[in-house]
Amino acid sequence: MSDAIEVTDLHKSYGDHHAVRGVDLHVAEGEILAFLGPNGAGKTTTIEILEGFRDRTSGNVRVLGEDPQDAPLPWRERIGIVLQESEPVPELTAAEAVRMQAGYYQNPRDPDKTLELVGLSDSADHRTRKLSGGQKRRLDLALALVGNPSLVFLDEPTTGFDPSARRESWGMIEALRHLGSTVLLTTHYMDEAEQLADRIVVIAAGQIVAEGTAEELAASVNAMTRITWQPSPDDPRPPGRFGWSPDEHGGAMIETNDVLMTLHALTSWATELAIDLPKLNVARPSLEDVYLLLTTETNEGGGS
Ligand code: ATP
């Protein structure tokens, strides 16, 4: 599979401020990649360079085989961009807005099918100004998809959504996978990245600090699994060899990378003494824990 996005040693400075510092990024065709990072990390700068809206200071960039800085018009047609906020013409209906947008492309997707794809068929005749926040985001996605793009940039697609609207949007984004589109997604929601992305790239202070699947990121920071339980007051304390400590809820906690062996030892000990391990729970590190570890380290060591 070839790469839809190839970036090598990308740098961008704003005056004295070195905002992007040697970024390498490869996104395969058909891949959904989540690009995460704290505020000011350099996500927007990098993405706008990929979209051709911002010039770089140095480095090599190829997006769908072209340099975005001087790519021809047909290249732009192969890219769909969903911004965090957009204002479609308020007097148009959703269907009219999508049809009008389709008119700008050589090889558009069928507008009605596009509305169906984003779950907006029922509101197709509603004026865009009357659409709810969630419906507007669907329309944004329809407007980006109707040109039949090979590559879609989604900028924080569910910011401000309630939990059920977020889940619905995830379904829509999953639908892009079936269309074979490459997707570069920025988000501040770790569960969203974990749910949708094939791979996650984390940027902090202008540099890529980690990339991989959620599991690979967790392994890279040695984030440990927590085994917790709530001992009854009369139960004997577990032996020190378990390396346990009291947790914040008055229970007992073991942090380990060797979950199977630790659980085996703990449950054998409990079985021998015929005691229960009430509320026994095994919690893998969340992507949020991992992300905080990755970005805190970098920000603490960083500077401009
Ligand atoms: P956020 O999550 O807040 O959108 P980000 O990761 O997208 O952050 P960028 O917007 O790329 O970060 O900004 C990276 C750094 O470059 C920040 O320190 C920002 O203040 C600075 N910066 C961005 N655009 C400009 C500009 N046009 N002129 C000067 N500095 C800028």
Image: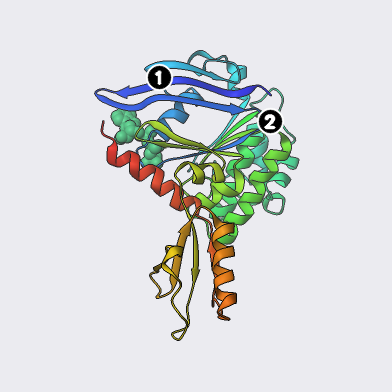
Depth check: 278 or 298 in front?
278
Tell me how many marks there are.
2
Say if 219 sits above or below 71 in the image.
below
Q: Look at the picture and state if 50 lies above or below 272.
A: above
- The residue type indicated by label 1 comes to Arg
Residue in view at x 51 percent, y 52 percent: 257
The residue under the point 58% across, 81% down is 274
For marks 2 and 1, give the one nearer the viewer.
1
Quadrant hosting residue 175: top right
Q: Quadrant of ligand 1?
A: top left
Against 155, residue 1 (above or below) is above
Q: Which residue is mark 1?
A: 56
Residue 239, percent from left and from top = 44, 70
Residue sitting nearer the eye, 63 or 120 = 63
The residue type indicated by label 2 comes to Asn
Compared across the picture, whether 165 is left or right of 86 comes to right
- The residue indicated by pointer 2 is 148
What is the crowding at mark 1: few (fewer than 14 residues within 10 Å), some, or many (at least 20)? many
Q: Which mark is residue 284?
A: none
- Residue 220, image x, y percentages: 48, 41
From the viewer's perspective, is 251 left or right of 16? right
The residue positioned 71% from the left and 54% from the top of the image is 122
**Is residue 97 among what the camera can see?**
no
Residue 249 on image: x %, y %: 40, 73
- The CA distance from mark 2 to mark 1 is 27 Å
- Indicate the position of residue 47 as horizontal and vertical percent values: 47, 30
Q: Residue at x 40, y 75 (%)?
A: 250
Q: Secondary structure at mark 1?
A: loop
User: How is the model colour-coded?
Assistant: rainbow
